[in-house]
Amino acid sequence: MMSNSVNPHIDQELLVRYLSEETTTSENEAVRRWLSADERNKAEYDQLKMLWEASGKVKEAVSVNIKGDWKKVKSRIDNNQRIRSLPSAKEKRGILTHLIRVAAVVTLLVTVYLGWPVFSDWGPVEMITVTVISDTSTVVLSDGSRVVLNRNSRLVYPVEFKGNVRTVTLEGEAFFEVVEDPSKPFLIKTGEAITEVVGTSFTVNAGIKNKVLVTVLTGEVLLYPNANQEHKLSIVPGEQGQLKNGSELTKTQNEDINFLSWKSGILVFRSTPIDQVVQDLNTYYDLSIKVGSSALKSCMLTATFERQSFEDVLAELQLVLPIQIQSNEGNIILTGVGCK
């Protein structure tokens, strides 16, 4: 919850104008001094920025990484009628996306500013709910831990952690950077699963039916069923743990190099089969691409895309693979003679 008690001299209207890049040089300096004066000021600002970005009123800085050969032929591709005729992601979402953003920010405003009390052994605890429908949002918790929520996700957490554990509830997918505190473990409840950590970074994906996936980047994470908390699976960097149907625990090496692409904006393919390429593109761009020719299944792709538009990615695919692209009732269909 945001509060003006940290520094009564900061004007909330000034912060809003700062976010919209409408402040003067002296006002910019005043905001920067306020941010550096106290960590609580920074937390307050991060929450306001999260709401502002979720409303769609701030343009994301987009970094495009395009190879030299791609730069040379891009003007030629821009004149290709077939590529230009494909529906763009912006056109597909249109007014609906704008309305979704408005609905999302209304939910954020109501729950972040108002919250509601939950009673525990430590008395009433005010809770915050953040719901993200499109794009991603970052939440800074009271202990300094950071949570990046993927689209179609929801996080419920207390304004302040009390007691001997730090507990949050997640629906969907999120990336966690948990501040270490051995005396107060961090628990993430996702349906029938609990993920327990002390301090580490990892992703939790509870957006798959009857399944929770936990992928660890640093530290160690424990995954276990809510119904059987003695049966714990230890997961370390490079591993992915899975709880299926509320009781089946398994662990494998993580071979999905694009599992964090939704956060990083980077898609990497290294001699990747076209079926996997299509699957990753569908997940990242939230679209429907299909391989319409069995001959294409022999094709492999080596490429890196960094925050590129869907149209640019399709155009580059045509440069490096013998494929044709068709659009049919919202579906993008790849066809061709295949690769030798």
Image (cartoon, helix red, strand yellow):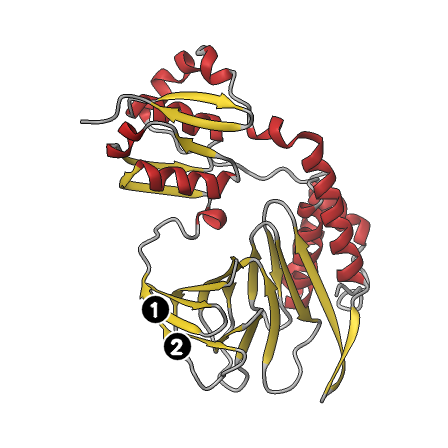
Asked if marks 1 and 2 touch (Cβ < 8 Å), the reply is yes
The N terminus: image quadrant = bottom right
Q: Give the labeled residue for mark 2.
A: 233
The answer to whether residue 169 shows anywhere in this view is: yes
Residue 166 at x, y percent in the picture: 59, 78
Residue plotted at (49% across, 83% down):
228
Question: 224 or 84: nearer the eye?
Answer: 224
Which element is circle 1 on?
Answer: strand
- Along the line of sight, which residue is nearer the eye, 286 or 149? 286
Q: Position of residue 30 (x, y in %)?
A: 71, 52
Q: Secondary structure at mark 2?
A: strand
Question: Residue at 62% of width from left, 26% of height from top?
Answer: 91
What percent of the width, then of the height, locates residue 200? 44, 70
Q: Indicate which disc residue 110 carries.
A: none
Q: Residue 325 in the image: state x and y as whole percent.
A: 41, 21
What residue occupies the far left of the structure in this picture? 340
Q: Is residue 123 left or right of residue 157?
A: right
Mark 2: which amino acid?
A: Leu
Instruction: State left or right for residue 51 relative to residue 70.
Output: right
- Residue at point 42%, 38% (across, down): 306
Three-letter residue code for mark 1: Lys
Q: Which residue is mark 1?
A: 251
Q: CA distance from mark 1 to mark 2?
A: 8 Å
The one nearer the camera, 213 or 65, is: 213
